[in-house]
Amino acid sequence: MPSALNMDDILSQVKRMDKEDQLTLLEKIALLIRRTKSKMNL
């Protein structure tokens, strides 16, 4: 999977976010996972 950033870069950026922004990001990731799983079950 090509990516401009590696995992360490991403985690470093997330650590610099405030807790509210981290929670928002986590909610968005969870939503994407749920959508992907539901598409795979079709």
Image: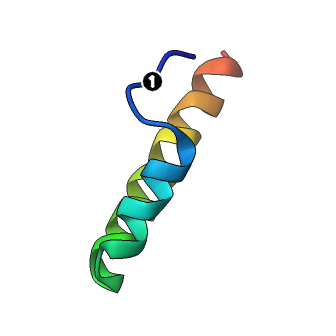
Q: How is the image coloured?
A: rainbow
Q: Nearer the viewer, residue 6 or 34?
A: 6
Establish if 34 lies above or below 20.
Answer: above
Residue at x-position 44% and y-position 50%? 10
Establish if 2 lies above or below 35.
Answer: above
- x, y percentage for residue 42? 66, 15
- x, y percentage for residue 22? 37, 72
Check the image and name the residue furthest to the right: 41
Residue at x-position 71% and y-position 22%? 41
Q: Which residue is mark 1?
A: 3
Which quarter of the figure has residue 4? top left
Residue at x-position 58% and y-position 21%? 39
Give the class, few, some or many, for how many residues have Cα within 10 Å of label 1's Cα (few <14, many ≥20).
few
Which quarter of the figure has residue 21? bottom left
In what element is the residue under mark 1?
loop
- x, y percentage for residue 7? 55, 45
Q: Is residue 20 left or right of residue 30?
A: left
Establish if 4 lies above or below 15.
Answer: above
Q: Nearer the viewer, residue 1 or 6?
A: 6
Check the image and name the residue furthest to the bottom: 19
Residue at x-position 57% and y-position 16%? 1
| Tally of numbered tags | 1
Question: Mark 1 belongs to which amino acid?
Answer: Ser
Q: Is residue 16 left or right of residue 38?
A: left
